[in-house]
């Protein structure tokens, strides 16, 4: 009797990852999932770190690989996990990011109104569940946190989940930012389950400390890098301007899928009916549209598009205190006079906002440390590092973006 064919993917982070035959393999082959090959994991961060071109597809496969190791570790420690639960948690982690739009977060704040990628991920999973005759029912329960074995949800979505465990190591690798390089193997090896909760054994406390510090550093140095912030703000504003023009009757050159979202108001109530069209959208739609829009008659749309395509970004300043309104008005006024544009148009180029960094939030489940005496305590209490408590505090900073003086 021939053994069933095994599919392996060679990942640059972990080496070979085995893809289970059956529903998991079929989901990876599905067009909804294959779309993730065309969506960058870190949005426009490659304008700062040239190596950061890796995709949501790579991240999802990496998460699956880490989850497989975590489940094996738990089983080896006597945690009983059924075949159905294993498949369910594998599907949940594989599809946890399937709802991301082009450039990961830009869509959520522009042409789709108030719809999170988590909500769209759930809709995709429910649509796939119908197509796969209910095979994703348990995965959806685990993903939503409604399944009675809560540690499975913690593995997918928690303060020390397989999502964070992969993206920190992967993003560190592709950006070359060594400070984010966590010890994934040891984190996974220290996992256990007690009282239906995911815990980390006491000897792994220092590895968790390193994980939290790495997360904080990666946010300040990579995810919240000032150039990355202004780039993401610009692409959001490009799409907002494109939608504004479309609603006023201007027909813009773009793909059919992008055209649909520019012309229609899509919110949490209507996104479900637009799921197939959303599935056709990826980074390529946005980039090709912006290349066309660089020569458009509209000053705002063309200048914003050129800023991204040519990496001629806005100036950005960051400080703890909010910027004075007079500073904002000064930059706007200068721009309005120079280019004879309205205050509304100038606001696309001059704006303020806030960024925040909280490496650890124990109110959202926390990270439980299993002490050698059998007690469970939060990692902050288990740690002898005073600095770890400071990681629980949210640090908020203000930014101001405005055009560079034209040479």
Image (cartoon, helix red, strand yellow):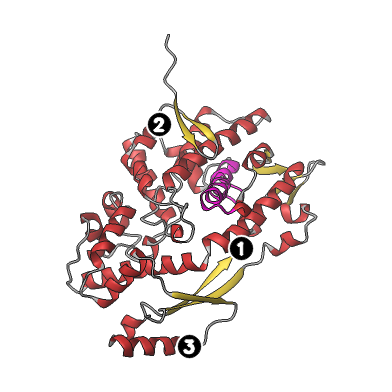
Residue shown at the point (39%, 86%) measured from the top left: 332
Residue density around tag 1, few if under 14, some if 14–19, many if 20 or more, within 10 Å: some
Residue 339 left/right relative to 221:
left
User: Residue 384's quadrant in the figure?
Assistant: bottom right
Quarter of the image that includes the C terminus: bottom left
Q: Residues within 10 Å of mark 3 (few under 14, many from 20)?
A: few
| Span highlighted in magenta in the image | 150-177
Q: CA distance from mark 2 to mark 3?
A: 55 Å
- x, y percent for residue 397: 57, 73
Q: Which residue is mark 3?
A: 327
Task: Please give the residue where the numbered disc 1 appears in the rendered image.
Answer: 358
Q: Quadrant of the N terminus?
A: top left
Residue 157 counted in the magenta span: yes
Q: Which residue is mark 2?
A: 25
Q: Mark 1 or mark 3, which has the lower sequence index?
A: 3
Residue 342 in sight here: no
Q: CA distance from mark 2 to mark 1?
A: 36 Å
């Amino acid at each position: 009797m021939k053994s069933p064919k095994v599919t392996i993917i060679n990942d640059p982070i972990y080496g070979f990852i085995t893809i289970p035959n059956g529903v998991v393999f079929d989901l990876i082959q599905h067009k909804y999932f294959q779309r993730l090959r065309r969506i960058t994991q870190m949005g426009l961060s490659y304008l700062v770190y040239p190596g950061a071109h890796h995709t949501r597809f790579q991240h999802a496969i990496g998460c699956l690989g880490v989850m497989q190791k975590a489940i094996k570790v738990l089983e080896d420690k006597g945690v009983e996990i059924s075949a159905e639960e294993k498949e369910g948690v594998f599907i949940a982690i594989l599809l946890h990011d399937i709802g991301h739009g082009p450039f990961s977060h830009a869509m959520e704040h522009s042409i789709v109104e108030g719809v999170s990628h988590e909500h769209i991920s759930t809709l995709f999973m429910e649509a796939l569940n119908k197509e796969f005759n209910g095979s994703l029912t348990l995965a959806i329960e685990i993903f939503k946190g409604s399944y009675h074995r809560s540690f499975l949800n913690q593995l997918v979505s928690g303060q020390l989940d397989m999502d964070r465990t992969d993206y920190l190591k992967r993003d560190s690798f592709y950006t070359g930012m060594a400070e984010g390089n966590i010890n994934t193997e040891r984190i996974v090896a220290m996992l256990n389950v007690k009282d239906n909760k995911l815990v980390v054994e006491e000897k792994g406390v220092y590895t968790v400390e390193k994980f939290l510090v790495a997360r904080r550093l990666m946010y300040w140095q990579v995810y919240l890098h000032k150039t990355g912030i202004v780039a993401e703000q610009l692409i959001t504003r490009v799409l907002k301007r494109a939608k504004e023009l479309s609603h006023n009757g201007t027909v813009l050159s773009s793909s059919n899928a992008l055209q649909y979202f520019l012309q229609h108001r899509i919110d949490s109530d209507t996104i479900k009916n637009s799921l197939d069209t959303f599935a056709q959208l990826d980074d390529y739609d946005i980039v090709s549209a912006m290349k066309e829009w660089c020569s458009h008659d509209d000053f705002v749309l063309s200048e914003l598009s050129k800023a991204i395509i040519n990496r001629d970004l806005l100036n950005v300043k960051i400080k703890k205190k909010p910027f004075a309104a007079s500073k904002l008005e000064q930059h706007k006024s200068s721009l309005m006079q120079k280019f004879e544009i309205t205050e509304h148009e100038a606001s696309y180029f001059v704006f303020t906002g806030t960024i925040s960094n909280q490496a650890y939030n124990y109110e959202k489940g926390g990270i439980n440390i299993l002490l050698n005496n059998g007690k469970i305590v939060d990692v902050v209490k288990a740690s002898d590092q005073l600095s770890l408590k400071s990681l629980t505090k949210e640090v908020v900073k203000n930014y101001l973006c405005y055009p560079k003086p034209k040479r």
